[in-house]
Image (tube, grey):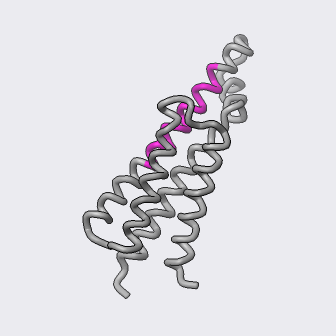
Amino acid sequence: MSLKKVILSALIIITIGTVLELYLLDHYEDTLQLIPILCIGLVMLTVILLIFLKSKLIKVAFKVILLITALSGIYGGYLHLLANYEFEIEMRPTANNWELLSESLSGALPALAPFSMIVLALIGYSYLIIINQKQ
């Protein structure tokens, strides 16, 4: 199996797996919760287009979508951590900031889970590098 097929397979698996997990977690109840689902949908659509048409416009659009996807992961991590932190403050008002932060990282909302969007974007960018190489 070629590297291109391996990366494409990884990209397909992470997009399907992540959107399925978000769906099963009801991660669509709020407008902000739709951001990763929308990003994943755009990544999937663009990958399908890239399989058949490798035009410069589609490649540039894919890069932009991947950048937005990575940024959504950073923003999601911030939102998850903030929500956990605010919950910990309510539960433990006398705790110091370090205790609150460490508890927030393992809180009810998985603070690091949104960073999977960054991984998705990196896999997508790897696919773009592979298809841009002259063969």
Vertical placement of residue 70 versus 127, above or below? above
Give the image quarter of residue 107: top right
Vertical placement of residue 132 versus 86, above or below? below
Q: Quadrant of the C terminus?
A: bottom left
Span highlighted in magenta in the image: 69-86
Q: Residue at x 66, y 33 (%)?
A: 109
Residue 5 x, y percent position in the rendering: 53, 77
Q: Residue at x 44, y 57 (%)?
A: 43
Residue 80 in magenta? yes
Q: Is residue 26 left or right of residue 60?
A: right
Residue 68 x, y percent position in the rendering: 40, 47
Residue 124 in magenta? no
Q: Residue at x 58, y 57 (%)?
A: 16
As drawn, the residue found furthest toward the bottom would be: 135
Give the image quarter of residue 59: bottom left
Q: How many marks?
A: 0
Identify which residue, 33 or 102, lies in the foreground.
33
Q: Is residue 115 left or right of residue 66?
A: right
Residue 49 x, y percent position in the rendering: 37, 66
Residue 129 x, y percent position in the rendering: 40, 71
Q: Residue at x 66, y 28 (%)?
A: 101
Identify which residue, 1 or 50, lies in the foreground.
50
Please, what is the dominant secondary structure of the magenta stretch?
helix
